[in-house]
Every structure is written in C-alpha cells, then in structure tokens.
Image (cartoon, rainbow, N blue to C red):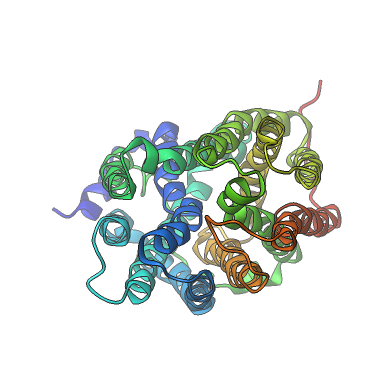
C-alpha cells in the first residue's frame, strides 16, 4: 500500500481533530529551507569558494524568474495530485533534503556557481510545491477547528515556522558548520514528514477544478496578493543584508548568530500574542500595528554605527516581534479569503508562494550588486560611503516599502468581527 493510499484510509476522527503541533513542526521544516537560505548560502559561497556577490545575486534572481511559470504551475499540480498528496509531499521533502546536503555538505563537483544554481533550483522547486500543499491543506483543516480556525491554525503553523527559522539561523554554529546544518535539516525532514503522515487528507480536500480565475477575479484576493508582495519586500531586504550590516556596519564580528537568533526568537514568541490579539480585535487592525512597529524599529537602526551592539539587540527584539505579526496574520487573512472564493486553495497559494519569494530574489539582484559597485567587500575594511549605503539599504528602504504595504492594507476592505467584550 502506498503512503497516499494509507493516508486516504486515515480514521475519520482526524478530520475533526487535526494535530496542530504537527502543522507547527512541518512549518518549521519549510521555514528552515526558506529565509535562512538567503542568509547563509550567499555568505557561505563567498567565504568558501570566492564567488562574487554580484554573481550570486544574479543567480538568485534568475532562479526566481523560473517561479513566474513554476509556482502557478505547481499550484495546478498540487490540486491535480490532491488524491496522492501524502506521497507527493514525501517525494518533494526527499528532493529538498538531498539538495540541501548537496548545497552545504558536498564539495561542488562542478564550478561552484553552477553547483549553487543547480542545488538551489532543486531546493526552491521542492520548497514551492510543499509550501503550496501545506497552506492549501490548512484551508480545509481550519474548517474542522472551532472558533476562528484560520487564526488558530496560523498560530501553530507560523510559530513553528519562526522557531524553525531560529534553529536554522544558528544551526551552522551549533552543529559545527554548514555540513552539520544540512544534516540536521535532513533529520528534521524525516521527523516532520512522519508527524504529518495522516494529516494531508484529513480535511476532505475538494477535487473540483477551480483554476486561477476565482482568485484573480476576486478584488480582495488580488489586493491581499499585492499586500503580500509589498510586505515581504522589507523582510527580503533586511534578510539579505543582515549579516553584512552586523559584521561591517556595527563591527560586531561574532555577534551575527546571537543577534539573528534574538530577532527570530522574538518573532516566534510574539506570534501567538499577535494571533490572540487578532482574535479579539481583528487581524487587519492588529497587523497594521505590527507594521508600524517595524517602521519604528528599522528607522531607529539607521543611526547606529560601530559598537552599537546592545542598541541593535533592542531593535532586533522590536523588529522580530513585528515580523511575528507579518508571518502569522497576513497568511491567515489570505487563507480566510481562499476558503470563500477558492476552497481548494492550491492555485491561490501558488500565486502567494510566487509573490512571497520573488521579493527575496529581487532584493538579492538589486542590493548585492549595488553594494559591490559602491566598493563594499564582505569581511574587509570598507569606505564610509559604502557603509552609509549599507545603512540606507538595510534601514530606510524597508521603511519605505512597509509604508507602501500599509497603504495597500488600509485600502483593502476586510470585514471582521472582533471578539471584544
């Protein structure tokens, strides 16, 4: 019996009793393969193989262009393969784990830049498919939960994701290097797949074909996709430049790991708080509060210079807490809308996956070559002009992008009932 067949015969009690911790663990796996790659991979290939920042930024952008076609197509594939979702998820996780080992734990048998591109193609493709399946499954699973199910599920899923980012952020240091990080990721993959083994079909996924039409024709869904695009851009910018900012602008070599952990741990601890506040006051209102906090935090970082480690630690706490709101509430708002206009949700989250990841690649292709042209060199003494540009890109650009996202969200007509007494 295949894994998918076994999944389809899972006891019906799973439909009314989803295992939310399993969703949290699988969210941690996906998160460990997402944002941390943009933090670790460029610096690893610069330090280990001498690949230029401009070349890495170009590769990251070209790979994201593939998603213009790939992510929507994977959304279609996720719906077509819904009856075999457990099996297809298992295969995709295997591909992602092996590619992660190839990226960090194996000396490139090809030119390092070509190997980097090949392994990242496999990681990103598997990551895209798994993200689409995972979030689409959540739409059906949330319907089995009492109360505001999408917020309850998001609280577990996104808190797990943020904890996964925390673990991945410090894993190279904690596990003795990047090879240890890749091996730890492979072990996490096995545990996460096992924990979700009987959850993929539990919600009774609809099999009717909806396509992209219902999503793109719905004005609120379109607006939320634009909000996601604008709101992911500040995270993309700060994630791409974080290690360089700490190392070169703050002159805090050795503090990169602890500060990164503080940032994501603050996000993980704040995510359940934001979620519960959203249940009481409404997700849109609470999300806007988190976005304003993000602007305050990043704007404050612009004044920092060499040695301002403790001030930046406070900023990491504040900006991390704001990230917890972004990662928890915006996907919940989109999932709630998908439940109304496209219950299968696969195509909708195919589009969501594309806009979320495209910003990371755009940040890489624009920011890294810009810094290099200004004379910036990682791990070396840099001219003041290059360091000033680094501060502008890391601190002020995210503020401007976040203001755009706030404007789009304010203009989006989302009607919610608060639970205030």
Nearer to us in this view, 390 or 89: 390
**Quadrant hosting residue 146:** top right
Q: Nearer the viewer, residue 375 or 395?
A: 375
Q: Is residue 132 left or right of residue 311?
A: left
Picture residue at 27% right of the left edge, 56% below the top: 101
- Tag count: 0
Where is residue 266, by image quadrant?
Answer: top right
37 relative to 74, above or below = above
Task: Residue lying at the far left in this picture: please name it.
Answer: 1
Residue 231 vs residue 74, the one in the foreground: 231
Position of 30 compared to 282: left or right? left
Q: Position of residue 91 (x, y in %)?
A: 26, 60
Locate the C terminus and report the quarter of the image it occupies: top right
Residue positioned 42% across, 35% down in the render:
18
Picture coordinates of residue 310, whole percent (x, y): 67, 30
Residue at 43% x, 47% y: name it: 32
Determine if residue 293 is in view.
Answer: yes
Q: Where is 69 relative to 135, above or below?
A: below
User: Residue 415's x, y, as percent?
Assistant: 80, 46
Residue 373 in the image: above or below residue 321: below
- Is residue 206 something one can see in this rendering? no
Q: Is residue 102 left or right of residue 238?
A: left
Residue 233 appears at what percent x and percent y? 67, 60
């Amino acid at each position: 019996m295949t894994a998918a067949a076994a999944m389809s015969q899972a006891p019906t009690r799973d439909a009314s009793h989803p295992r939310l911790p399993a969703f949290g663990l699988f969210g941690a796996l996906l998160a460990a393969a997402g944002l941390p790659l943009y933090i670790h991979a460029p610096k690893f290939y610069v330090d280990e193989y001498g690949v230029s920042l401009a070349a890495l930024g170009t590769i990251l952008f070209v790979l994201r262009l593939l998603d213009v076609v790939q992510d929507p197509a994977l959304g279609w594939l996720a719906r077509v393969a819904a009856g075999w979702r457990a099996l297809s998820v298992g295969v995709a996780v295997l591909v992602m784990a092996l590619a992660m080992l190839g990226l960090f734990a194996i000396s490139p048998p090809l030119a390092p830049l070509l190997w980097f591109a090949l392994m990242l193609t496999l990681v990103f493709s598997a990551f895209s498919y798994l993200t689409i399946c995972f979030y689409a499954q959540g739409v059906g699973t949330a319907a089995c939960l009492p109360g505001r199910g999408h917020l309850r599920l998001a609280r577990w899923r996104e808190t797990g994701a943020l904890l996964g980012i925390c673990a991945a952020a410090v894993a190279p240091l904690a596990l003795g290097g990047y090879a240890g990080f890749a091996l730890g990721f492979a072990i996490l993959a096995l545990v996460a797949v096992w924990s979700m083994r009987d959850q993929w079909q539990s919600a009774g996924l609809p099999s009717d074909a909806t396509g992209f039409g219902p999503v793109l024709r719905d004005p609120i869904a379109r607006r939320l996709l634009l909000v996601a695009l604008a709101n992911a851009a500040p995270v993309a910018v700060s994630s791409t430049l974080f290690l360089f900012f700490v190392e070169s602008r703050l002159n805090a070599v050795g503090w990169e790991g602890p500060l990164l952990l503080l940032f994501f741990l603050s996000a993980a601890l704040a995510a359940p708080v934001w979620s519960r506040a959203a249940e009481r006051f409404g997700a849109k209102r609470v999300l806007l509060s988190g976005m304003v906090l993000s602007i305050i935090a990043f704007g404050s970082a612009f004044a920092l210079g060499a040695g301002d480690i403790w001030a930046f630690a406070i900023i990491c706490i504040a900006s991390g807490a704001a990230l917890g709101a972004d990662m928890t509430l915006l996907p919940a708002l989109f999932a709630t809308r998908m439940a109304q206009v496209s219950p299968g949700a696969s195509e909708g989250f195919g589009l969501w996956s594309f806009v979320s990841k495209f910003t990371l690649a755009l940040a890489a292709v624009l920011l890294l070559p810009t810094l290099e042209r200004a004379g910036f060199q990682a791990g070396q003494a840099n001219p003041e002009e290059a360091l000033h540009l680094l501060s502008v890109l890391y601190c002020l650009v995210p503020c401007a992008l976040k203001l755009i996202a706030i404007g789009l969200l304010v203009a989006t007509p989302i009607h919610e009932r608060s639970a205030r007494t």
